[in-house]
Image: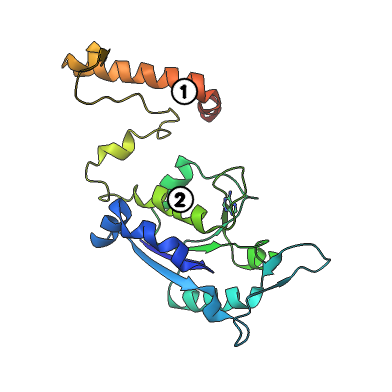
Amino acid sequence: MRIDIITVSPELMKSPFEHSILKRAQEKGKVEIHFHDLREYAINKYGKIDDYQFGGGAGMVLMMEPIDKCLSQLMQKRKYDEVIYMTPDAPSLNQQMANSLSAKENLIILTGHYKGVDQRVRDKFVTKEVSIGDYVLSGGELAAVVLCDAVIRLIPGVLGDETSALTDSFQDNLLAPPVYTRPADYKGMKVPDILLSGNFPKIDEWRHEQALKRTRLIRPDLLEEESLDE
Ligand code: ADE
């Protein structure tokens, strides 16, 4: 997979890609990340990329021209599966969306800043708009990092143990069950006996029950979604 990220703050975004799973995914050749600094496509030598909004109102809006120049250059070189715009006024990211994006070849992610981008960018170029939740960040940069992390870890071969992504929370509309490690008894706080029993079918059953219990308690809406899916 190749991901091209268009942003006004590449430096804000780079470090998460230099550690842990995102770093290893790149080293293994599973994903290439390319940052494009929108300022390099500014409309004048002073680096102008934004302007006041028509009709008045506080906050600057990213202009069409720099984004058009950057996107057009990229799109001339290869075909992209999606041009994603990170914005709070969009459908929320979920595991299903991450699963489907993890199967794509080439993605562009555009991150907003200030008051966002000129609507004409969204109308002409953007094929998918994604929010990471019902709250407003200072810009789309951190949201784009969250999206990349959720997607890249699902690319086959990125996680060492292939099954570990399959047992994540949300993969089957359930939250993950509790996990424990050594010692089996920490100052009187004991690990449930079933996990020490070696009876793996029973352990699976217990985990499923626990997942259901947690989901019912914390996110009953996920169980409702499941019955809607059927
Ligand atoms: N930009 C600002 N807030 C955001 C959010 N919640 N999701 C995606 N992009 C954003």
Residue placed furthest toward the right = 55
Q: Quadrant of the N terminus?
A: bottom left
Is any atom of residue 230 visible in this view? Answer: no
Residue occupying image coordinates x 31% and y 15%: 206
* Amino acid type of the residue tagged 2 in the rendering: Val
Q: Is residue 66 above or below residue 214?
A: below
**Left or right of residue 158, residue 51 in this image:** right
Q: Residue furthest left?
A: 198
What residue is pinned by disc 1? 215
Q: Position of residue 217 (x, y in %)?
A: 50, 19
Could you say whether the residue bearing mark 2 is in a helix, strand or loop? helix
User: Is 25 left, or right, of 6 in this rendering?
Assistant: left
The correct choice, above or below, for 218 with respect to 143 in the image is above
Q: Secondary structure at mark 1?
A: helix
Label 1 CB less than 8 angstroms from ligand 1: no
Q: Which residue is mark 2?
A: 146
Q: Residue at x 80, y 69 (%)?
A: 54
The residue sitting at 25% across, 17% down in the picture is: 203
Residue 202 or residue 183, whichever sits in front: 183
Give the alpha-carbon distance from disc 1 to disc 2, as whole Å.
Answer: 23 Å
Asked if residue 98 lies left or right of residue 59, the reply is left
Question: Where residue 66 appears, x then y in whole percent?
Answer: 60, 77
Disc 1: CA contacts within 10 A as few (<14), some (14-19) or many (>=20):
many
53 vs 17: above or below: below
